[in-house]
Amino acid sequence: MKRTRPSLGAMLAALAAMAPRRLWLGGMALACLTVLMGMALLGLSGWFIAATGLAGLVPATALVFDVFMPSAGIRLLALGRTAARYGERLVTHDATLAVLAALRERLFRSWAPAGAASQLRLRPARWLQRLTGDVDALDSLYLRLAVPLVSACGAALLAAVVLGAMHWQLGLLLGLWLLLVGTAIAVVLARRARRPALRRAAALERLRSQAVDLVAGQTDLLMAGRLPAQCARLAATEACVAQADRQLNRLEAHATAAYGVVSTLTLVGVLLAVGWLAEQGVIGAPGAALALLVALAAMEPFAALRRGAVEAGRTWLSIQRLAPQVVQAPVADTAVHLPPPGVAAVLEQVSARHQGSPRWALEAVSLQIPAGTQVAVVGASGAGKSTLLSVIAGELPATQGHVAAQPGTWLTQRTELFQDSLRDNLLLACPGASDERLWQALEDAGLASDVRAMPQGLESRLGEGGLGLSGGQARRLALARLLLHPAPCWLLDEPSEGLDAATARDVLACLQRQMKGHTVIVATHLRREAESADRLLWVEGGRLLGDARRGTADFDKLLARLRDDAATPAAHAMAKGF
């Protein structure tokens, strides 16, 4: 079924629902109140200074002039403006941070269905950009567009009311002038800044991807003689970002100048108007000062829109990118069902292909694995062993056929560790595990003595990707995490790959000691990983070509032909034997 792109209204409604309405409305109300109190403070101060100056010219007037009420009002407005400003910053940022946190959680959940891990691995820089840069860009929607717009409208309304009390036509004209010209500058700025903002966003994403490639592959690039070329590409992309920044800064400077010109024209127009009203005797000098200062302050909230207008293009792009994950509900993953009691996994005529590939990764595979057995899936590299584990785990949905499997935990070829403490890396498998259970898992994995030798023990910090541990230690830590997981089925994808012989034997011995009571399915081309299995499944070209059980001649034949290097010619010879 074709997936339709969510509308802007649906996206805004979804974002608005992520924070309590009182935060949204309260933040806007406090921001508007801050602006209004600032304008009132400035206008009342100007009126009070002019009025007291005129009153002091005549002794009789000076004696009866009330200085206490205006001065009390000025103090009240000054204190109120400070409190409103503090409350506005607190509430608006609280609302924004709450939405961004909820948005990141929803994005994580939308990337959880089958196939998500492989997609993240294919384009890590792109998805990292979605989770960081695109999410952060959405704070402009509320903080730099919605809140300043409400405040600017409130300022235009107050200015219109104050001058309308002196002359209704002047008040109406001023309000319309502020609304039309103030918003027109922001709209023109947003339209002109859209293209460089989009170029900057695309260049930043490209810069991040190229930087990741440079850091991760610098050894290969150096050996291939491509390191200078990659550095040149990175510098060219950075130049594109800098050029877009210069264009955006230039546009923002032009907008600042435009708002300054409009503010000056507004002040001149009001000055001429109140001068005419004073000449006609409609208002006095204090009233004229009040009108001038209110008009002077009325354009300032509109000028605050320029930052949001400059970033509007980037914000709109982020909305388009994130809307499918935010608005549309995640599709329930029903590819894998629970098998009958006593069975770990059942596949019936299952075929599957990887996204974007025209050929079958698995084709017409049928098998049944009883619970509590140990099965080794063997074959040459690229034969479909890992794909079979992906289908059983539910990571790769079956295109055809039926799959039913027990909940499982998957130890992939890559040891996925995070820049965090040892404890938190272990708690990913069992969040409620006690320290005693963590130490027992480390003991079972043969890593407890190494962790005890570390100064901070379980609190020892790992670098990115598990930096700080050797390859064998990282594999043992992943094994300890596997032992902590309560899943009854273990899926092991070449668990000792890349380890030296002694470490590999030790890791496999640890696994063998803990396998009791679990269903274990190992994908391997190494004899040392398959020799303890109860059953061998031979896979070649995505097809199941052999199924041998321990104690049979076929089992011994397959096992005898497996070597540590698992040469491809031998693999083909085994396939022909069936």
Image: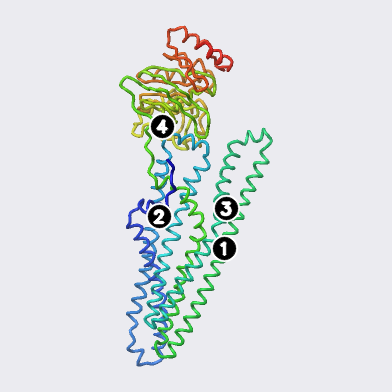
How would you rate the neighbour count of disc 2 (Cα within 10 Å): few for under 14, some for 14-19, many for 20 or more?
few
Q: Residue flagged by tag 1: what amino acid is it? A: Leu
Camera-side mark, 3 or 2: 2
Image quarter of the N terminus: top left
Q: Which mark is residue 9?
A: 2
- The answer to whether any part of residue 480 appears in the image is no
Using the numbered discs, state the Cα–Cα distance from disc 3 to disc 4 in whole angstroms: 42 Å
Using the numbered discs, state the Cα–Cα distance from disc 2 to disc 1 in whole angstroms: 28 Å
Near-viewer residue (350 or 19): 350
Height in image: 265 above or below 446? below
Camera-side mark, 1 or 4: 1
How would you rate the neighbour count of disc 4 (Cα within 10 Å): few for under 14, some for 14-19, many for 20 or more?
many
Instruction: Identify the image quadrant of residue 108.
Output: top left
SS for tag 3? helix
Camera-side mark, 3 or 4: 3
* Residues under numbered marks 3 and 4 in contact, where contact means CB atoms less than 8 Å apart: no
Mark 3 or 1 closer to N-term?
3
Q: Residue flagged by tag 3: what amino acid is it? A: Arg
Q: Residue flagged by tag 2: what amino acid is it? A: Gly
Camera-side mark, 2 or 1: 2
Near-viewer residue (399 or 98): 399
Height in image: 490 above or below 25? above
State the image coordinates of residue 568 (x, y, percent, origin top left).
58, 18
How would you rate the neighbour count of disc 3 (Cα within 10 Å): few for under 14, some for 14-19, many for 20 or more?
some
Camera-side mark, 4 or 2: 2
SS for tag 2? helix
Mark 4 or 2 closer to N-term?
2
Using the numbered discs, state the Cα–Cα distance from disc 3 to disc 1 in whole angstroms: 15 Å
State the image coordinates of residue 401 (x, y, percent, origin top left).
41, 26
Which residue in the protein does label 3 denote? Answer: 199
Which residue in the protein does label 1 denote? Answer: 251
Which residue in the protein does label 4 denote? Answer: 426
